[in-house]
Structure formats: structure tokens, C-alpha cells
Image (cartoon, coloured by chain):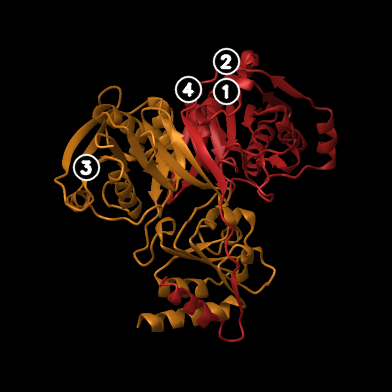
Amino acid sequence: MTNRTVLVLLDPATEIRTSALELFTIARGLGTVEAVALAGVGVEVLAQLEAYGVESVHQAEFSDAAGRVVTGDERHLPAVVAAALAAAVRRADADVVLLPSSFAAKEAAALTAHALGAGLIIDAAGVSEGDDGRIVGSKRVFAGSWDTSCEVTTDVAVLTVRANAVVPAPAAARVNTQTEPLPVEVPELGVTLASREVKARSGDRPPLEEAAIVVAGGRGTDGDFGPVTELADALGAAVGASRDAVFEGWWDTYVGQTGVTVAPRVYIGAGISGAPHHRGGMQASQHIVAVNSDPEAPIFEICDFAVIGELADVLPQAAEEIRRHKG
Amino acid sequence: MRIVVTVKYVPDINTDRGFEDCRVRRTPDEGTLNELDENAIEAALQLVEAAGEGEVVALTVAPPDGDPALRKAFQLGVDRGVRVSDDILAGADYFATAAALAAAVRKLESEGPVDLVITGMAALDGLGSVVPTLLATELGRPALTLAKKLGVSDGVLSVTREHDDVTEELSAPLPAVLSVTDTANQPRLPNFKRIMAARGKQVEAWTASDLGLDAAPAARTRTLSAGPRPERPEAELVTDKGEGGKALAQYLIKNDLV
């Protein structure tokens, strides 16, 4: 393990997300950590890389086949990200590539593995070294009901890792992170990107996919997310919804196997019955709490604690109690 | 407009899913057409209907046990169903699956142009969401994935792509590979007329050698173990009689979760 090199995708390069810190933490347990950024990193980002033991950061400098510099949003397209990662693996002679488990990163991971002939594990909940020194990814599948472990049998391993796989921790000692330009030729995509918008992250609440506590509302809210957001804010939690609630236009992001998959320390579902689709997106949570007026709601079968009652009564009272506890 | 839709036969998410010998357990009566493929089929049918002529071919890589997925596709209005089965494809990973699908699309192209390959956003068993982009790479075609809205005009496919916290407007000339999300459309239901028409349709069975594949690419990963998680202990249930919120808060506080 001592001479293994682990690359971690850093996208965006302008701010460090919790998911990146988790990947650095995992990577340190596997070997020497290097980051790959799609743009130059700033001073604040660099300081965090140093604290997390990232030895160097490869800063991609993209150009097209004719040698023209590419700086636009195209840099975030999976095929372009994959070109950068593959170039970095070749230059650093890296053994492992870690990415977050976002939809875009999964595609980039697949294309990177395709280009390198590398083994691919998607949605790992843990990454470790197996008995014979190979990389092993553990996964929680079928709505959190089965655990699998999978060994990569090729020289290079590419993995996407789910949020909350580990608690991020800085390295025992700071390192002096080297920055190195990484020339990357942008592949011919055949795709035109007319616009790209990144939803602004609310400064008040943590992002759903990274939050340690999630409060989600469903059909039982009847469209009033006031009690849901009140409890979330008392807890410092992210807010999510069921797919039904999003289809009704009551909230914008849903937890579910085709929406955001969450695995927080605490998941609180309010007015959510717990259909298979929803369970597939939250069943790996550590503590599951449910509030529902229907005593037959299927979510009660998978929760640790539940209140049978009206969420409009229960959630504000819980919020008040939490606020009092926090003082 | 000639469109190939890739489909997969998966264990029904409402059944007790699991593994056997480190492979997903697939029983004929607990399987179903991957629900997310219905959005892909719907997108294909709508495009062909809008074009006024064309053909929708459902394509799967599966043992013959997977035919119910194709028959369901027939009931939704798909014209043809092709199944690629071969011992060398058993246990195919993402890359081998994408390569086999690509080879089958090329064989369909040898009969006539394929304008578009459409897939669902994921298969509900593996949830990898990477085969569409790998298939596009294998075919050397542009990939427009995770489309929430789509349209074809003058041979150009335009989509609104939504993923994570990003919204993108993308376009590519046909032929291309497209994946659609579960919010892209509302899949139609089989009706009596379509069910009757489906009865006359036959699954076309191809082997790997029909596609010019003589060996499966070596697998790059190996499953070491697969085991069910322990059941959660019985939940603590409180009926709200005016103190339910406090009980919830106390549960969080006593477990050090606040």
C-alpha cells in the first residue's frame, strides 16, 4: 500500500465540498493522495488540500485538437472530465481513482475506466484493501437490504463513493501540496452545450446529498412544508421530499432511487408512506424516524422510531423541544 | 425515424430481492420490465408518432428468461423485440453489456439506419446509470443522458439535462444515444388493442456469434460476498396524544443525534 497512488476528482475547483473531504479521508487509508482539478485551485482550497494530506493537485489545462484553449462549461461534461482523469492516471501512474457518486461523476468514472481498461465500482459505501492487496469496494444494494463486496481485478481501480461513507478527518500532519499543470486534449464529443446552470446552494441548509440529518416531507404535508422546514432548521438538517411531493410541485428535490440517494446519520420522514421507490433512496440511513397519521404506513416497517400522529402537530413541537435543548 | 430502445428484465422492487452465489437472484415470476425503461419506450413511441413513420425496436441482453420484458414492451406498442443471449455473456459487467448492446445496434444498422438509441436512466437492480454513456462510446455516437425534456428538429436532438444540482441544455446531431429520466414523460399503459397486437409478435433471438462477438471481454471486478443485512430491531412506536413531538425530540437527544 505504501507506493499506491490514489487520485481524487476535485470538481468544482473553487470550493471544497464535504464529499471531497470524505474522499481524501478514504484515499489516505489507501496510499499517497493526489487531486485532479478541472481548473486552477485558489488559496483557500489549497489550504484545505494541505490539511487533508493531498500531496499534489493536477490542474487540468484543456485544449481542443487544434490546440485552442478550452475554458468553458464543457469542462464539466463527463467525457471531458474522464479525459482529464485518464491523463492524470497515466502521468501519475496512479492505481486508484475516487469520485463522488453524483450522476455526472458516475458517467465520468465509467468513461475513465473504459479508456484505461480499469475495473469500475459504482456507489461504493466503503473502499478498502483486500487480503491480496487489491482494492475492494463494499456496496449496500436493494434499498439497503443487502451488503456486497467486490474486488477490482485490474491494475487500475475506478470507484464512485457515496456521501457519508466516512466522517471526514484532516491528516495527522499538514503537507505542502504541489500544484502541477495537466495538459488535456478535449475529445470530440459531437455534443453542443448551450447552457449550464448550477443551482445555488442555500447558505442556510446543508446540501441534501451530504447532510448528516435529513427531514423529508411527502403527500401527508398536503403541500405545506412549513413544519418540515421548521424541524429541519432546528436540527441544522437538509430538506427533501418524496417523488409524489415533487411531482405536485411542493418541493424541488426528491429522495428516492432515481432522485437523490441519502445515507445520513438521521433520516426523518414526515407524511411519507415509504413506497419502494422512496425506500431505495434512504433505507441505508443509520437512524430512521417516521411521522405518519396512518398506522399502516409501510415506512413503519423499516424505522427505528415513529410517531403515529399529525405531522403539523408533531414536527413543530419537536422543533421547539430541540431548540430548547440546544439553548 | 428508426429507434432502438434498450430494456432490461429486473427483479420487481416490490418483491424480496437478493443474491444467489454472488449474482442477483432472478426468478421468472418475480421479474418485470425495468420500470425506468418504460420512459424510454414512451419517448421512442412519441418520436416515431411525431415523425409519422418509423419503427421502435426493443433490445435486451439476457437469457430467454428475460423475454417477459420484451413482451411487456410489445404491449406498450414496440414493433420488434430482439434478445441477445449467449453463455459468454452470462455475468456481463457494464463494459461487456455495453459492447454487446453496441454490436446488436450495429447489426440492426446493417438492415437500415438507426437514428436514435434510447435508454432509461438506470436499471432498478444495479442502479449504475453508466451503460448509456458506455454504449454511446462503443458506438462512437454523441451521448445525451438524463434528459428531462427532449425534442428532435431537422435531425438535431435537443435535451434539457438535469442531474444533481445542475441543469444543462445540450444538443447533438442524429444518430445519437439518449437516456431519459423518470420525469421525461408519463408512460402509456397497455390497452386491449395493443395487448392483442402483442400476441402476434415474436422475440427475435440472436447469439453472440450473430453479432461477431466470439469471446466475452474479461471481467474487471469479482464479487467476493453478498449477504442480507440484519433486520432492524422492532421500531419504537409512539401514538401522539399531545406529546408526540417531544417524544421524537427526546429520541434524538437520548441517542446523541442532535
Upstream in the sequence, badge 1 or badge 4?
1
Residue wearing tag 1 = B100
**Color of chain B here?**
red
Chain of residue at mark 4? B
Nearer to us of marks 2 and 3 is 2
Residue A298 circle label: none
Instruction: Kindly indicate the quadrant of the structure image that contains residue A89.
Output: top left
| Disc 1 crowd, CA 10 A, few/some/many (<14, 14-19, 20+) | many
Give the residue type that dot 2 points to: Leu
Mark 4 neighbour class, 10 Å CA radius: few under 14, some 14 to 19, many 20 or more: some
Mark 2 element type: loop
Q: Colour of chain A?
A: orange
Circles 1 and 2 on the same chain: yes
Q: Residue A327: give x, y in percent of width and height.
A: 35, 83
Q: Amino acid at mark 1?
A: Ala
A216 to the left or right of A15: right
Q: CA distance from mark 2 to mark 3?
A: 44 Å
- Proximity of marks 2 and 3: CB atoms separated by less than 8 Å: no
Residue count near mark 2 (Cα–Cα under 10 Å), binned few <14, some 14–19, many ≥20: some
For the residues marked 3 and 1, what is the alpha-carbon distance in whole angstroms? 40 Å
Q: Are marks 3 and 1 in contact (CB under 8 Å)?
A: no
Q: Is residue A105 left or right of residue B234?
A: left
Image location of residue B4, percent across then percent down: 63, 28
Q: Are marks 1 and 2 in contact (CB under 8 Å)?
A: yes
Q: What residue did someone put label 3 on?
A: A40
Tell me which chain the residue with mark 3 is part of. A
Return the disc, 2 or 4, that comes first in the chain's sequence: 4
Q: In the displayed structure, would residue A118 be above or below residue A290?
A: above
Looking at the picture, does residue A114 appear above or below residue B163?
Answer: above
**Which residue, given by chain and number where applicable, does mark 2 sit on?**
B213
Q: Secondary structure at mark 1?
A: helix
Q: Position of residue A260 (x, y in %)?
A: 49, 53
